[in-house]
Image (tube, helix red, strand yellow):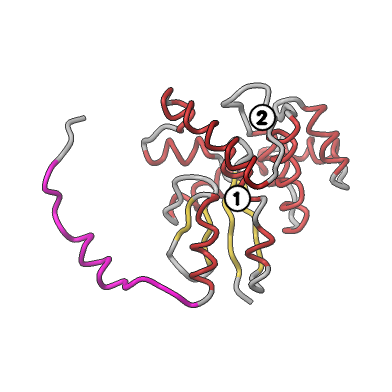
Amino acid sequence: MTTVRCYADPVSPYAWLGLADLERIEATGARIVVVPVLFAGLLSAHGTVGPAEVDAKRRYLFRDVMREAARRGLQFAGPPGHPFNPLPALRMCTALDDDTQRRTLLVSLTRATWEHGENLMDDATLVRLADAAGLDGAALLATAQTPAVKTALADATARAVADGVFGVPTFRVDGDEELFWGGDRIDTLLWRLQGHAIDEKVLRAFLTREPMAQRKR
């Protein structure tokens, strides 16, 4: 069975849209493994900033997200403020050893903030949402605050960086270096799962070409 890893962080509205489409990937017979990663950690590792940190991109981003949500029939409320600190939520998801439970919680938390305006920086809210997902929220929150879980999330983010992941959501087929970044790349991922591919020799040859201009920084 083909396994597709989905790297996600509830701070991203595009992660919300991507997670809402997981069933389309599963319909191909693929197995989904959701991997919580810290988006801010990806940005720092690659020396970039998030789109919400650039005013023009921020205005575009939320119009685009609301437009896409409306097109899909999804309710948009948005978190109380953005960006917010997703570490408590990510650590709770990381604390779960079971892939199905981890996916269920991450999807539930992401939907809660983007569809219902829940505050994922509030411990009581996180406990309540975890309970609603069929978990022991209080115990999970306590485990999430342990050094081992904090290290596990940092390690997962570092491994994602090493695999070339720079944003969320990103999808990766196990055993394949090819990445699919963004909730709008599900169709391209499905195309790849159907056995299609680009000409890798052409890509490698193009990437060896020297830049013809350089922007001053």
Quarter of the figure with residue 67: top right
Q: Which residue is more in the foreground, 176 or 111?
A: 111
Q: Which residue is more in the foreground, 148 or 92?
A: 92
Give percent across and percent down for residue 111.
72, 40
Question: Which one is earlier in the sequence, the residue at label 2 or at label 1?
Answer: 1
Local crowd size for mark 1, using a 10 Å CA cut-off: few (<14), some (14–19), many (≥20): many
From the viewer's perspective, is residue 23 above or below residue 62? below
Residue at horizontal 65 percent and vertical 60 percent from the top: 33
**Position of residue 78 in the picture relative to residue 12 (left or right):** right
Give percent across and percent down for residue 202.
25, 70
Quarter of the figure with residue 147: top right
From the viewer's perspective, is residue 156 above or below residue 147? below
Residue at horizontal 52 percent and vertical 61 percent from the top: 172
Task: Name the residue type under label 1.
Answer: Gly
Give percent across and percent down for residue 159.
50, 53
Task: Name the residue type under label 2.
Answer: Gly
**Position of residue 164 in the picture relative to residue 120 (left or right):** left
- The verdict on residue 197 being magenta is yes
Q: In this figure, which residue is indicated by the disc labeled 1?
A: 18
Q: Is disc 2 placed on a helix, strand or loop? A: loop
Quarter of the figure with residue 12: top right
Q: How many numbered markers are drawn?
A: 2
Q: Which residue is more in the foreground, 162 or 107?
A: 107
Q: In this figure, which residue is indicated by the disc labeled 2?
A: 78
Local crowd size for mark 2, using a 10 Å CA cut-off: few (<14), some (14–19), many (≥20): some
What label does residue 188 carry, if any?
A: none
From the viewer's perspective, is residue 25 above or below residue 76? below
Q: Which residues are magenta?
A: 195-213
